[in-house]
Image: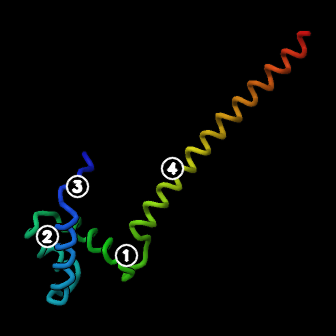
Amino acid sequence: MSNQTKFSPEVRERSVRLVQEHRGEYPSLWAAVESIAPKIGCVPSTLLEWVKRSEINNGAREGLTSSERDRLKALERENRELRRANEILKTASAFFAQAELDRVLKK
C-alpha cells in the first residue's frame, strides 16, 4: 500500500471547512462527515482525520500540531542516528584499544 496523497491541500481545506460549516445541521460530527465524504470522493474516516488534524492545528482540540509532530519525528530520527554513531564509536574504540594492547605486549 502506497502512501500517496490523492487529495490536494486545497481540497482537504475546503472539505474540512464544509464539514465545519454544516456540522450544526447533523446530530454528530460523524454524521456530518459521513454525509459530506462521498461528495468529495473519500472515505469518512479519512475526512474525519482531516477535521481532527485541523482542529488540533487551530487549537480547538488537544494534541500535537502538525509542525510539532514533524519536529518530534525529526528529533527522534536524529536521536536514533546519534545512538547508532555512539555504538559505532564504542566498538571502534574497543577495537583500537585491544589493538594497542596487543602491540604493546608483542614488543
Q: Mark 2 to mark 1: distance in Å?
A: 20 Å
Which residue is under mark 1?
Answer: 56
Q: Give the label on residue 37, or none.
A: 2
For disc 2, the neighbor class at 10 Å (few under 14, some 14 to 19, many from 20) is some
Q: Give the label on residue 69, or none.
A: none
- Relative vertical location of residue 87 with respect to residue 102 in this rendering, above or below: below
Amino acid under label 1? Ile
- Residue drawn at x 25%, y 46% is 2
For disc 4, the neighbor class at 10 Å (few under 14, some 14 to 19, many from 20) is few
Label 4 sits on a secondary structure element that is helix
Q: Looking at the rendering, which quadrant does residue 88 occupy?
A: top right
Q: Nearer the viewer, residue 72 or 34?
A: 72
Q: Mark 3 to mark 4: distance in Å?
A: 23 Å
Which badge, 1 or 3, comes first in the chain's sequence? Answer: 3
- Between label 4 and label 2, give the one nearer the viewer: 4
Q: Residue furthest left?
A: 39
Label 1 sits on a secondary structure element that is helix
Q: Mark 3 to mark 2: distance in Å?
A: 16 Å
Residue 23: percent from left, percent from top: 19, 85
Which residue is under mark 3?
Answer: 5
Q: Mark 1 to mark 3: distance in Å?
A: 20 Å
Q: Are marks 4 and 2 in contact (CB under 8 Å)?
A: no
